[in-house]
Each structure stands twice: as C-alpha cells, then as structure tokens.
Image (cartoon, rainbow, N blue to C red):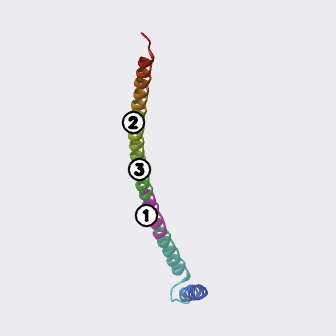
Amino acid sequence: MKSSRDFLLGFITGVVAGILTAPKSGQESRQWIQDEADKRTKDLQDQWNKGVEQVKTQVEQVKSQVNQWTGKLQDESETKKEKFNDSVDNLANKAHSGVDSAKQSFKVD
C-alpha cells in the first residue's frame, strides 16, 4: 500500500513539475489544467452515472426475483391451506358420521 501511495505521489509531483516547467505560458498552462480537470470531472460523472444505473438495474432484478418467490410461496401456502382444510373437513365429517352411528346403536326402541 505504501509503495502504491509513493508511486502515485511521485507521479503527481512529476506531472506538476512538467507542467510548471513546460514551454507554455502561465495562462496556457492554467487553461490546460482547467481543461484536463473538466475532462476528468466529466469522465468521473459519466462513470458515476453508469454505476448508479447498474445498481438500479440490479435492484430492479432483485425486486423482480423477490416478487416471483413471494408469489410462489403464497401459491404454495394457499394450496397447503386448502389441503389442510379439506383434511379437517373430511375428518370432521367422519367424526360426525361416527357420532351419528353411535347414537343409532344406543337408541332403544
């Protein structure tokens, strides 16, 4: 990490020294620096906007996937609920039939 930082510092120092000792006038050098700064700023803004768009796209994909999973879970839940209710109804009907049958067998004529 330190060597990267040292390299970057040396590179920047070299660029600044080169600009300051260039055979251009001060006004030309300042204009060049301003133009380069504007260009780099625009490049960074473009990269930022691309990154934001990529994140938005990913978020939309995740939302879509979650909605699909939620829909599947709701469908499965509803199916299991229906099966459970059918089983309970069936069991209740059998119990009712058994009670009726038991009542019939204890009836005295």
User: Image quadrant for the C terminus?
Assistant: top left
Q: How many marks?
A: 3
- Residue 102 covered by magenta stretch: no
As drawn, the residue found furthest toward the front would be 109
The amino acid on which the numbered mark 1 sits, given as a three-letter code, is Lys
Name which quarter of the figure residue 16 lies in.
Answer: bottom right
Q: Which residue is mark 2?
A: 82
The spot of residue 40 in percent (x, y) is 48, 73
Q: Position of residue 87 (x, y in %)?
A: 40, 35
Task: Choose mark 3 or mark 2, whichever is in front.
Answer: 2
Is most of the magenta stretch helix, strand or loop?
A: helix
Where residue 97 sits in the image (x, y, percent)? 40, 24
Lateral position of residue 101 relative to residue 4, left or right:
left
Q: Nearer the viewer, residue 104 or 35?
A: 104
Specify few, some or many for label 1: CA neighbours under 10 Å numbering under 14, 14-19, or 20 or more: few
Q: Which residue is mark 3?
A: 69
**Residues in magenta, as a range:** 43-56
- Residue pointed to by mark 1: 50
Which residue is at a point 50% across and 78% down the rendered structure image?
32
> Relative to residue 76, is residue 20 depicted above or below?
below
Q: Is residue 91 above or below residue 33?
A: above
